[in-house]
Amino acid sequence: MVFSKQKLNLGLGNILSQIQLQECLEQIQIIEPKPGQLFWTSNVSNPGVYLILEGKIRLLDQKENLIASSIEAGLGQISLFPEADLQTYMLRASLGLKLGYLDNNSLQFLFKRQPELKNLFYRQALQWDLLLLSDNVQNLLPILSFLQPYQLTEGVVSVLLPEPSEVIVLRRGKILHTSGVQLIPGKLYQTSCLPQDGEWAISKSTELFYSLNPVDRVQQPETIKLDRQLGKLITPRPKIDLQDNLPPIKPLTTRICPYISNSQNPN
């Protein structure tokens, strides 16, 4: 069983030419992990990217909690960017999983010819990282491909974002408002509920992601063209909690800065 050019092209973001796709097909390795096998760990395995031919990959955090299952989107991008501050994760095989594996040497050759492919893999690595940080995968997933990254340096600002947005999520860093509100990495915040007056203190190099307003999403297709695939092809799964058997406890929120909860509002 081999990859078709069409399936490979989809997995690589529709970036490569037909000649480059053919060269890539000659380099790809077909792998069939056993069902249930933990076949890859981001911080110890060889760098490379896995593209799904058949079946499903399960994404686990470093404690082996199930975060999401992917039926088509590639995984392993984190291994190509060891200098980035990304969460460690593992990959477990489901029944009937067949993969195409591109090793680091093959990918570096492709990156030289198509730098946009490296940019795509980096954006996808960040998207996986947001899922690993999140305690609310179900709500994050529908907007994942619309999220735009934004960097903040140390200092004080009165406005966090460069343009209007619906939701923000902090990936790394520390942001504290003069009212006492502090943003927690991985949590979704409605921007309309954040403090509108006062200032935000950025105490370290910070990266957050924000979603454009619905109208702006339609007006800016180029910003999501290459990222849209990942958001569509993941089946979300809740993180495993050791307290799942206990009665549900509503998360604490404040009137000033509620985050988007994965619990339903009380009637």
Image (cartoon, grey):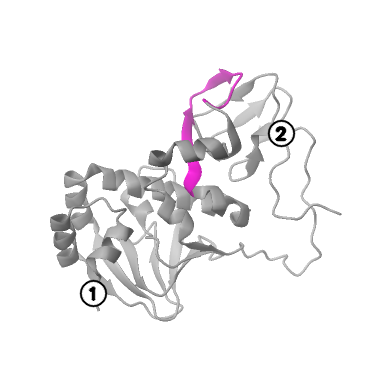
The residue at 57%/36% (across/down) is 213
Residue 116 image offset from top left, x and y in percent: 27, 43
Q: Which residue is mark 1?
A: 2
Q: Amino acid at mark 2?
A: Cys
Residue 256 image offset from top left, x and y in percent: 76, 32
Horizontally, residue 228 falls left or right of residue 46, namely: right
Q: Is residue 151 magenta?
A: yes
The residue at 40%/39% (across/down) is 223
- Is residue 39 depicted above or below 191 in this figure? below
**In the depicted view, which residue is nearer to us: 239 or 82?**
239
Range shown magenta: 145-162
Element on which disc 1 rests? loop
Assess disc 1: are there few (<14), some (14-19) or many (≥20) residues with their C-alpha within 10 Å of its C-alpha: few
Among the two numbered marks 1 and 2 on one chain, the one whose residue lies closer to the N terminus: 1
Q: Which residue is mark 2?
A: 193
The residue at 65%/28% (across/down) is 176
Q: CA distance from mark 1 to mark 2?
A: 50 Å
Quadrant in which the C terminus is drawn: bottom right
